[in-house]
Amino acid sequence: MSLYNQDFTISFGDCDPAGIVYYPNFYRWMDATFHGFLRARGPGHAALCREWGAMGLGLMETGATFRAPGVDGDRLVLSIEGIDWSDRSYRVNYAGRVGERLLIEGFETRGLFVYREGRLRAESVARVRELLQGAGAA
Amino acid sequence: MSLYNQDFTISFGDCDPAGIVYYPNFYRWMDATFHGFLRARGPGHAALCREWGAMGLGLMETGATFRAPGVDGDRLVLSIEGIDWSDRSYRVNYAGRVGERLLIEGFETRGLFVYREGRLRAESVARVRELLQGAGAA
Amino acid sequence: MSLYNQDFTISFGDCDPAGIVYYPNFYRWMDATFHGFLRARGPGHAALCREWGAMGLGLMETGATFRAPGVDGDRLVLSIEGIDWSDRSYRVNYAGRVGERLLIEGFETRGLFVYREGRLRAESVARVRELLQGAGAA
Amino acid sequence: MSLYNQDFTISFGDCDPAGIVYYPNFYRWMDATFHGFLRARGPGHAALCREWGAMGLGLMETGATFRAPGVDGDRLVLSIEGIDWSDRSYRVNYAGRVGERLLIEGFETRGLFVYREGRLRAESVARVRELLQGAGAA
């Protein structure tokens, strides 16, 4: 069971000269799904950053495996399948399907970044975990 | 009354360092709305091109006026408000709203392009008109 | 004679299933050319906004006419051909060429936006004009 | 020593509300660097596909580690540091730097895809290897 799902209609302009999704768009959609999840569980990224004095829930690492191509008109459902928590980072795992067909498996490893002494630093992600796990679920 | 509406959830990654929608994305969304309309009235762009021996329903001119900024989490409804038909082109008129708030008014002037004698040429758009007007409506 | 030129190598991923540039990318390139011009004449957008207490040199209206398609590998030169100044806005005129071939003519009408009394307002663009015209040229 | 380098000027519009590069753009730039490399060693993707009866040199897997943020005005140099060859795939390794500063390390695992019996299939990449290694280098 997924933690969160978001839908995207794949359009002509998301596709490359081979007629299939230009792959950086899958990362755009993973990121958009994460932000949708943030807004479903709290006030969204901008308000969280103000509240936490943070610069952002930015990326440390991302990756994806492409299983099948997507084309114009496909209804892509991107699911957050789980989150692996560490002290200063968390890995969000995604799967993207069109109907039963698996198009993509991917992940984003994110931190909680603050500016301190003129540098971006990765802080404890305990507050992010509390927000996204809600009542202990996940 | 609009001819067609399509929804987009504005996300963090659609926005620029000022925190508002980076404007080329509005054009992406207009184009995606047009392709959604094509799929609602027929088999979609790729199948139409095969059927008509065409290269595409490409663009001659586009433009937009930005009335108010959009931000992360806004639900944008893009509407095709009308189409002005000429012999070899048609102008699709859009409005984009978040609730009652008008964000954007824009247009795309499109043709029906075929390769002939080594050049892209704009053909009569009668077939496009027939498809998009359906039973004489619009 | 242009005020400023910037080069872009059109790549596979900038193109759509018809194999030609997906048009919102031309707007991305016009915007990037404007920001390159800002950095050539001053400290760039972020520093200017801090200095001027502004939110941004944002957009009021944009438009483009597409004269010829661009493809993978084309070297696009985007030129700022001139700027038309008004009190609270300025229109930046662009032409994009691959060698001698004109691909696009476009414009961006921009303002100087500040937050005041909870709203975005368009201020006098006199400071922008002073910066971009340099020693009275343009 | 890198196999190939390509430059990109990071612009305002490539950045997100945190003011730093929106990460899917790094994948766009890796892909553009690969296509630049293809054009430096041969006739480019479209001509190769025609010649080889292929659909594309598409992606199986990609990933990136983000070391430092990029901002408006940064001159990003993306380098292909090496290629690891297998029978039906090859992994292209990238590093992206602004001056001495390492922004990103990434990879793309690509295949050579053809349509056969109604399905996309990954063929031997021997021809790709021959093209990209040139006179036995790499």
Image (cartoon, coloured by chain):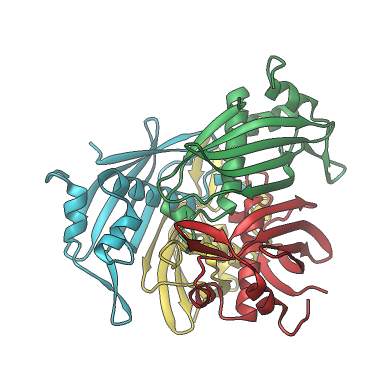
Chain colours: A red, B yellow, C cyan, D green
> Where does residue A59 sit, x and y in percent of width and height?
61, 58
Residue B44 location, x and y as percent? 66, 60
| Residue B55 visible here | no
Quadrant (top left, top right, bottom left, bottom right) of the N terminus of chain D: top right
The residue sitting at 58% across, 25% down in the picture is D40
Q: Is residue A35 visible?
A: yes
Tell me: C127 left or right of D24. left
Residue C27 percent across, percent down from the top left = 42, 53
Query: Along the line of sight, which residue is nearer the eye, A130 or A29?
Result: A130
- Residue extending furthest toward the top: D135
Who is closer to the viewer here, C53 or C103? C53
Residue B128: quarter of image: bottom right
Name of the residue lying farthest toward the left: C136
| Residue occupying the point 41% across, 44% down | C67
Q: Is residue A99 above or below residue C73?
A: below
The answer to whether B39 appears left or right of D20 in the picture is right
Q: Furthest-front residue in view?
A: A117
Quadrant of image for the C terminus of chain D:
top right
Q: From what the image shows, is residue D28 above or below residue A96?
A: above
> Horizontally, is D109 left or right of C90 in the view?
right
* Image position, residue D64 (x, y; %): 66, 48
Residue located farthest toward the right when viewing the structure as drawn: D117
Quadrant for residue A38, please give it: bottom right
- Residue found at x 75% / y 63%: A93
How many discs mark residues in the rendered view?
Answer: 0
